[in-house]
Amino acid sequence: MSEKRLSEIIKALKTAFPLTLPVLAGFFILGTAYGVLMSSVGLGVGWTFLNSFLVFAGSIQYAAIPLFLAPFNPIYAFFLTIMVNARHIFYGLSMLDKVNETGGFKPYIIFGLCDESFSIHSVHEPPGDVDRGLFMFFITFLNRWYWILSCIFGAVLGKMIPFAVQGLEFSLTALFVVIFLNQWEVKEARMSSILGIGCSLLSLLVFGASNFLIPAMILILAVFAFTPNPARKGVQP
Amino acid sequence: MSSNLTATQLFITTLVIAFGTTLTRFLPFLIFRRGQETPAYVKKLQVLLPPAAIGLLVVYTLKDVSFTNGSRGIPEFLSIGGIVIIHRLFKNTLLSIAGGTLLYMFLIQTVFSV
């Protein structure tokens, strides 16, 4: 490696690292809670590592814990995964051009995409003298490993100390409620938030807890087909 | 509470979830090549779908709450109320998540414990 390349790498890391610190704080709490939960259902460090390394998506990892307990049903697991993670598709759509400019880092940046990395990528542009590929790589890499190591830490902790974990799974509800509240601040997004809740509740009432997810998603997509596009009124996504 | 699946079934479930998640990440890059115009319906969904999806996920995580049995959804209701208040006051995502979760754990392990 040339000296020039090495200094480029260090510069990109120095630019990326401070931006990832809030993510470290968040992932440490949620990742530790995930590891503790996994070990409380008898799935230890190995399964915790495998899931956080291969899946690396907090909400589906939490949502999947009941799947590890219930009867074996990979097809349901697949559809639940698509539903819970469908938002990745929209993250990808809104940063197609940026990611296409990252050269050899592109597959890794897509593989490691998550809500938190997306929010950094969408707000922070690398300064002119910092390589975009390296910059986006380090954000992805750091966030991934904050999560994986926090999950492992939780699994080890859960094994050493018997926690009264009853209710810890509520952290997932809390996470979504907080994101919901943050979106509520954006006036243009309110109608969409209400439609999301309304369609989901309607579907829950009609189809029941175990079958409501897919009809709810279809209902939301159908309603949006007849909804005017707020972007046309000059609102940026 | 512990897993009833065999190691092979656990492994397959993990792989399916990993595959599904990876698919959602790569799909837009597989469908839309560089420089292609994004269709109008997709542009509309880019704006409308994320808030609705979060609403759906809130309902999803509460889907098993019963208003007729057990604690009748009171701890969930109180904890969400707590999150709204903490979030209004401090505007700190992490504090709101931790506060709401601890409140819920306290409620169902003490006041509403079965």
Image: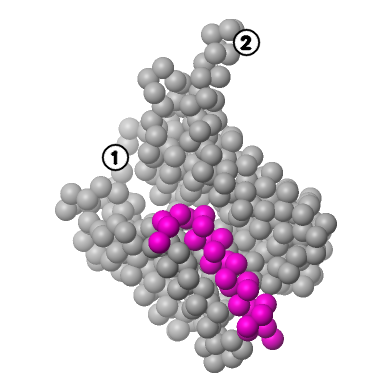
Chain to which mark 1 belongs: B
Image location (x, y in percent) of residue B44: 28, 54
Q: Which mark is residue A9?
A: none
User: Where is A27 relative to B90, above or below?
Assistant: above
For image coordinates 63% across by 46% down, the residue present is A147
Give amino acid for label 1.
Glu
Q: Which residue is mark 2?
A: A1
* A68 relative position to B6: left or right: left
The residue beneath circle 1 is B37
**Local SS, label 1:** loop
> Which amino acid type corresponds to the residue marked 2 in the rendered image?
Met
The vertical placement of B79 against A114, above or below, is below
Q: Nearer the viewer, mark 1 or mark 2?
A: 2
What color scheme is it? Answer: one colour
Q: Residue furthest left?
A: A233
Instruction: Examine the rendered structure and indicate whether residue B24 appears above or below residue A121.
Output: below
Q: Nearer the viewer, residue A193 or A78?
A: A193
**What chain does mark 2 sit on?**
A
Q: Position of residue A2 (x, y in %)?
A: 59, 7
Residue A44 visible here: yes
Give the magenta-colored segment's residue range.
B89-114
Question: What residue is at 67 percent from the left and 47 percent from the top?
Answer: A150
- What's the CA distance linking mark 1 and mark 2? 39 Å
- Residue projecting furthest to the bottom: B68
Left or right: B82, with A69 as reference point: left
Q: Residue furthest front?
A: B89
- Magenta stretch holds residue B14: no
